[in-house]
């Protein structure tokens, strides 16, 4: 069966520090991969999606970047965090035929 | 913008059926209706999806009107653990362009009460 791992679960980082959140998927090949952000009491906002190694599409201009160095690994990064980067970050994958999406447990990032 | 509208909140008594409505009046012929739920501080969980016919699985039933402009998610015997935000999403099952994205609204916050 397929599983998705996302870590860490919580993170407190100072303004101006770098960020690296990692997501890995097991039990499937060539998944579509996604990074979402959710502000408190709001819906999910798509940040990045990837349909293959090295292929990243950015949905909104922001202080973040994403990379996909391996087929089942998706990394969200920032060189210098801003206070506005605080939020709940979710990684997800879907099959190539793009049916249902499966989400990780999320990372709650607080920038102080 | 989300293509669906849902009531912001609903209550349901434990053990009773929870019926969550969703309006998608501009749905296209090739768009599916998907339902997810998000328990507090967790990632969303896929529940069910359908195109035209009613669907049922171990979690819920999905009733889609004949004109496909609205649907209802039914949790037949709600438990306290079903308390969550329920999202209704319409999308094309295609890996081309914008079809890869899910557009999320604010969902319905369901409170199951003892």
Image (cartoon, grey):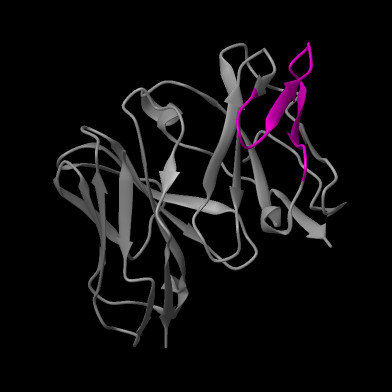
Residue B5 horizontal side relative to residue B52, left or right: right
Examine the rendered structure and indicate whether residue B102 appears above or below residue A97.
below
Q: Which residue occupies the extreme left position in the image?
A: A69
Residue B90 horizontal side relative to residue A96, left or right: right
Quarter occupied by the N terminus of chain A: top left
Q: Residue at x 64, y 46 (%)?
A: B105
Name the residue nearer the viewer: B18 or B20. Answer: B18
Residue A23 falls in image quadrant: bottom left
Relative image position of residue A103 (x, y in whole percent):
43, 49
Q: Which residues are magenta?
A: B56-77
Residue A15 falls in image quadrant: bottom left
Relative image position of residue A40 (x, y in whole percent):
60, 68
Residue A73 horizontal side relative to residue A6, left or right: left
Report whether residue B4 is seen.
yes
Task: State yes or no: residue B20 in magenta.
Answer: no
Report whether residue B33 is seen.
no
Name the residue nearer the viewer: A31 or B27. Answer: A31
Relative image position of residue B107 (x, y in whole percent):
69, 48
Q: Residue at x 54, y 66 (%)?
A: B41
Relative image position of residue B67 (x, y in whole percent):
78, 12
Q: Residue at x 73, y 34 (%)?
A: B73
Quarter occupied by the C terminus of chain A: bottom left
Examine the rendered structure and indicate whether residue B100 appears above or below residue A103.
above
Residue B37 horizontal side relative to residue A106, left or right: right
How many numbered badges does the structure rendering display? 0
Q: Residue at x 32, y 60 (%)?
A: A6
Examine the rendered structure and indicate whether residue B71 appears above or below residue B53.
below
Task: State yes or no: residue B62 in magenta.
Answer: yes
Residue B90 falls in image quadrant: top right
């Amino acid at each position: 069966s397929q599983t998705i791992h996302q870590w860490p679960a919580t993170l407190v980082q100072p303004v101006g520090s770098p960020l690296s959140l990692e997501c890995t998927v097991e039990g499937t090949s060539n998944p579509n991969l996604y990074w979402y952000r959710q502000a408190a009491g709001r819906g999910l906002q798509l940040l990045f999606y990837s349909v293959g190694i090295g292929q990243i599409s950015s949905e909104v201009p922001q202080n973040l970047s994403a990379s996909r160095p391996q087929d089942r690994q998706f990394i969200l990064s920032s060189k210098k965090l801003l206070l506005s980067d605080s939020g709940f970050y979710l990684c997800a994958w879907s099959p190539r035929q793009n049916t249902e999406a499966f989400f990780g447990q999320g990372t709650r990032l607080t920038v102080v | 913008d989300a293509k669906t509208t849902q009531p912001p909140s609903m209550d349901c008594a434990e053990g009773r059926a929870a019926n969550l409505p969703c309006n998608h009046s501009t749905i296209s012929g090739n768009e599916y209706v998907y339902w997810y739920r998000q328990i507090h501080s967790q990632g969303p969980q896929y529940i069910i999806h359908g195109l035209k016919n009613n669907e049922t699985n171990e979690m819920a039933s999905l009733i889609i009107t004949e004109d496909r402009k609205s649907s209802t998610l039914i949790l037949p015997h709600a438990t306290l653990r079903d308390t969550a935000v329920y999202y209704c999403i319409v999308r094309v099952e295609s890996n081309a362009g914008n079809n890869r994205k899910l557009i999320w609204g604010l969902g319905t916050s369901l409170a199951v009460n003892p």
